[in-house]
Image: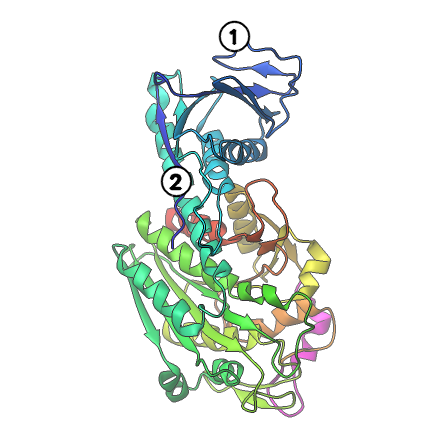
Amino acid sequence: MPTKLVDVEVATTSRRNVPVVVLAATGPALGPGGDGIDVSDLTGKAGETVRHGESWTLGVGTGTLSDYRVAGAALVRALSGEDAPRTTDVLLTPDFDAEKVRAFVLGAALGGYRFKVTGEVAPKRVGSLRLVTGDTGFEEVLTSAALKAHALATATSLARDLANAPSNVKDPRWLATTAAKLAEKVDGLSAVVRDEKWLRQQGFGGVLAVGGGSSRPPRFLELTYDGGGSNAPHLVFVGKGITFDTGGISVKPADGMHLMRTDMAGGGAVISALMAVARRQLSIKVTGLVPCAENHVSGSSYRPGDVVRHYGGATTEVQNTDAEGRMVLADAMAYAVKNLKPDLLVDVATLTGAMKVSLGLRTGAVFTADDSLAVDVIDAGERAGEKWWRMPLLEEHVEAVNSEIADYKQCPPGPGGITAALFLQKFAGDVPWAHLDIAGPARSEKVYDEVVAGATGFSARTLVELAERFARH
C-alpha cells in the first residue's frame, strides 16, 4: 500500500505517436480530433468507449459532472489488458472548466483501482493520461483542478486499501501502526498509537469491552494536523475501527460475515482524510481519532446485560454485542470533547443495517441537530461526488436511550439508525456534531461510476472537502 493510481497531467500540446482520445457528447457530437471518425455506431452516452485503430472515442453524455466521472473511469478500464498503452492524450473540448477536469480526473484515477492478493502479475493498465486543452491561458487553472482531484482520489484509494486488507493481516495493531507509518511520511502530520494498557488506565470501557473477546488487543490511534495557527477552527473526525466483526456473542449469520473486514471503513476514511488535509496544507487544525478493536467470540467476550463504563464515566447497558461500533465511538467522542475542545465533531461509521434499508447502497446518512452543518456536509459531498441524505433525530425516541440500570441503553427501541445516532449524541456534549452512517455505500458488490467491487472509500473525500470549507471560513 498505497495502490498506485493513474497519473494525470494538463498540457496545451499533443504528443507524437501517442494514442488519442476524442470526446463524444450525446448525439453524438465529436470534439477536437474527431474529423474523419465514423459516428454511425456512436451514441455519446457517458462511458461509451470505442476504438478506431490507434485512436478512441469516449462518450461524455450531456456533460454533467457525474457524466465526466463515469467517462474518466470507463476510459481507464478500457485502456487495460495485454495491449494497454503506456500513456494517451485526451483532447478536451473548449467548454472544459476546472469542475469538469476535477470530475474527469477523479473518475480516471479511481476507475482502474484494483486490490487483489495474488502471486500473479497484475494486468497491464494505462499508466498516465495527458489532458490537452486548446486554451493556453487556462492551463494553470486546469492543472490545479487536476492536482486537487488526484489528491482526493488518493484519499479514496487509501481508504479502499485499508478496508480491503484481509483481517488475518489487519488486526487493531496493524491498522493503527500502518496509519502511523504512513503519517510519518507526510509533513505536518503526527500520530500517536495507544495500547490496551493505556486504554485501561484511561477508562476506555467501550473499546476494551468490544476488544476483550479477541486475542489481538485493541488500539487507539490519534492523528494530528495543525496548519492553522491559534485562531483556526479545530475539527475532530472520529472513525469506527472495527477490524473484524463477528457480532460477538450476538453472533452474525455466516452469510456475508466475510465482508466484515470492511467494518473499519469509517476509520479508514478518517485516516485517509487526515493524510489528504496535511498534504494539501490546509489552514486548519484537524485531529483524527480511530478506536481500533476486533469484535470476536470467546470466553472473555462482553455480554448482553453487561454495564460498561465509558471514558469520562458515563455507563451503558449492553443489549446486543453486535452493536459494537457505537460502543467504541462513544469512548473516542467523549475523549475528544474533554481533551481536544473541538469546534466541530464528526463521527463516521458503518454503523447500522437500518441505513442500508432506508437509503440503499449508494447514499450516506447525515444526522445532526445543526441545520447549517447538515448543509455543509451535503454540499461537501456534492463537490466530492458522494451522495448524502439528512436523517432526523426524532424527539419522540430521545427518552428511549435512557436505561433503568445504567445511564444509557446501547440499542434503544425504535428505528435502528436513528436511535443509534441518538445514543451517540449523548457523547457529543455541547460541540456541533454530525454522525455519518456509511453502512450502505462503504462497500459495493459491483462496478459503477468510479466505484469498483469491494471497499469504496466512501466519505474520505467528503471529510477533506468539509475541512477545506471550514479552512476558508
Give the CA separation, mark 2 to mark 1.
33 Å
In the rendered view, does 321 fall on the left or right side of 111? right
Q: Secondary structure at mark 2?
A: helix
Label 1, secondary structure: give it: loop
Query: Which sits earlier in the primary sequence, circle 2 or circle 1?
Result: 1
Q: Position of residue 302 (x, y in %)?
A: 57, 87
- Where does the magenta region start and end? 392-409
Residue 113 image position (x, y, % from top left): 48, 45
Q: Residue at x 40, y 20 (%)?
A: 133
Q: Which residue is mark 1?
A: 35
Which residue is most to the front? 120
Q: Is residue 355 visible?
A: yes
Quadrant including the N terminus:
bottom left
Q: Residue at x 49, y 68 (%)?
A: 167
Query: Which color scheme does this rendered protein use?
Result: rainbow
Task: Give the camera-side residue of 74 and 53.
Answer: 53
Q: Which x, y percent locates residue 377?
A: 53, 52
- How busy is the neighbourhood of tag 2: few (under 14 within 10 Å), some, or many (20 plus)? some
Q: Mark 2 or mark 1: which is in front?
A: 1
**Frontmost residue, 28 versus 39:** 39
Taking the magenta stretch, the answer to whether it contains residue 381 is no
Residue sitting nearer the eye, 232 or 144: 144
Q: Is residue 259 left or right of residue 395?
A: left
Q: What amino acid is at disc 2?
A: Lys
Taking the magenta stretch, the answer to whether it contains residue 393 is: yes
Image: 348 above or below 7: below
Please name the residue that numbered disc 2 is placed on. 148
Identify which amino acid the numbered label 1 is placed on. Asp
